[in-house]
Structure formats: structure tokens, C-alpha cells
Image: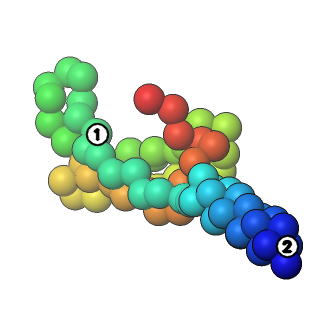
Amino acid sequence: MKRKLTLLLTCLLASISLTIAQTSKKVTGIVFSEEDNQPVIGASVVIKGTSIGTTTDLDGKFVISNVPSSSRTW
């Protein structure tokens, strides 16, 4: 019985850690022009290697939700 409980707990902890590792995140930022350092309106922002993206607002800000952890590099 103790062995079955230990195996069950091990499997449970492994599945929880895999779920946490695959959590998606949100990426936010502001795009500025290199020429005059002003916010860029309507710029396309795309996660490299995916089709996930958005455009900047009137203040040059963007938010991309549900970014898979495999797409994030720093």
C-alpha cells in the first residue's frame, strides 16, 4: 500500500511540474521610432517563429497574451 501511494504521489508531482512548465505568459511593451524616439502607432509585433502577434496602439504600446513558454527567450 505504501509503495502504491508513493508511486501515485510521484506521478502527481510530475504532472503538476509539467503543467507549470508549459504555462503561457503575457508580453507587453512599447515600440519607439529609432529616428525621433516617438511611439510608433500601428506597428506589427510578432513572436518570432510563430503567427502570434498584434499591433501597437496610439501610444505605441502592445500586449500579446498566451505566449507559449517555448517562444520566450531573453
Compared with 35, 65 (above or below) is below
Compared with 73, 42 (above or below) is below
Q: Residue at x 37, y 58 (%)?
A: 63
Tell me the SS state at disc 1. loop
Q: Can residue 6 be seen here?
A: yes
| Residue 7, percent from left and from top | 81, 65
| Residue 9, percent from left and from top | 71, 69
Q: Residue at x 26, y 52 (%)?
A: 61
Crowd class of label 1 (few under 14; some 14 to 19; many from 20; radius 10 Å):
many
Front-lying residue, 59 or 74: 74
Separation of residues labelled 1 and 2 (CA atoms): 55 Å
Crowd class of label 2 (few under 14; some 14 to 19; many from 20; radius 10 Å):
few
Screen quadrant of the C terminus: top left
Type of the residue with mark 1 = Val
Tell me the SS state at disc 2. helix
Q: Say left or right for 22 vs 6.
A: left
Q: What residue is shown with label 2?
A: 4
Q: Quadrant of residue 39?
A: top left
Q: Residue at x 63, y 43 (%)?
A: 70
Q: Say left or right for 3 vs 50.
A: right
Q: Which mark is residue 31?
A: 1
Q: Residue at x 46, y 45 (%)?
A: 45
Outermost residue, top direction?
Answer: 35
Q: Can residue 19 be seen here?
A: no
Type of the residue with mark 2 = Lys
Mark 1 or mark 2, earlier in chain: 2
